[in-house]
Image (spheres, rainbow, N blue to C red):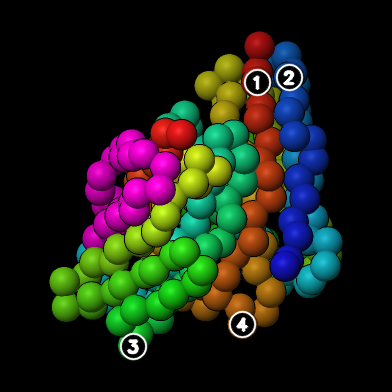
Amino acid sequence: SQQGEEDPQALSIQEGENATMNCSYKTSINNLQWYRQNSGRGLVHLILIRSNEREKHSGRLRVTLDTSKKSSSLLITASRAADTASYFCATDAGDSNYQLIWGAGTKLIIKP
Amino acid sequence: GAVVSQHPSRVICKSGTSVKIECRSLDFQATTMFWYRQFPKKSLMLMATSNEGSKATYEQGVEKDKFLINHASLTLSTLTVTSAHPEDSSFYICSARARAQETQYFGPGTRLLVL
């Protein structure tokens, strides 16, 4: 089932620029995760941020979480052509299986 | 990092036949595996959740008799699409997680085309 909404649906920027994607969700969460999917491939886990965290960094990635607004953002700094992919946020459903509820995704295109 | 494989990566079959897709966790024990379906340019749609040694839990609207899921070991789950029809053509992705771990590790996906 889909809970998250991501915006923009598509984003096209020049290489070297920063890319920001947003994700909103509807219910309380334990954590929020960001994944990346290259065309026609599986998903790769990028970063997990817990509900008691506000910001997290991993390399060129910066994730923020605002639980009061039920939103998160993913910032990719100094983008590269290889960052071209779809990016999905997912929130855990809080069940024993750690089932994830997925956003619609943002298609990011980095122009060389 | 954790590696999940899927086989086959691509399959073409005739309408009415059955297709089995395997999902394996290569370097960890997957207590839970998830099967997703993804339509072009869309997000993932969870089909079912399976715990090792238990029957799979199917999402609403997913026919359990059509999409048979077996999770007989801690490293292998299979999805069998029975009596496939052209509308079953899609990209099927599995993911796996270890016990008490929140992160899911994804297989590379299987593209199914039913003629």
Q: For the residue labelled by badge 3, is the local secondary structure a helix, a strand or a loop? A: loop
Name the residue type under label 3.
Answer: Asn
Q: Which residue is mark 3?
A: A52
Which badge, 2 or 4, is on the more N-terminal residue?
2
Residue A78: percent from left, percent from top: 42, 55
Q: Residue at x 39, y 59 (%)?
A: A77
Judging from the image, mark 3 belongs to the subunit labelled: A
Q: Do the dots labelled 2 and 4 sit on one chain?
A: yes
- Horizontal side of A71 relative to B36 (left or right) equals left
Q: Which residue is mark 1?
A: B113
Q: Is residue B37 visible?
A: no
- Seen from the viewer's position, the closer of residues B74 and A112 is A112
Q: Which residue is mark 4?
A: B100
Residue depth check, mark 2 versus mark 3: number of the one nearer the observer? 3
Q: For the residue labelled by badge 1, is the local secondary structure a helix, a strand or a loop? A: strand
Q: For the residue labelled by badge 2, is the local secondary structure a helix, a strand or a loop? A: strand
Judging from the image, mark 2 belongs to the subunit labelled: B
- Seen from the viewer's position, the closer of residues A26 and A43 is A43
Q: Quadrant of the N terminus of chain B?
A: bottom right
How many residues crowd mark 4 within 10 Å: few (<14), some (14–19), many (20+)? few
Q: Which residues are magenta?
A: A5-24
Q: Farthest residue in the left direction? A: A69
Residue A72: percent from left, percent from top: 29, 66
How many residues crowd mark 3 within 10 Å: few (<14), some (14–19), many (20+)? few
Q: Are marks 1 and 2 in contact (CB under 8 Å)?
A: yes
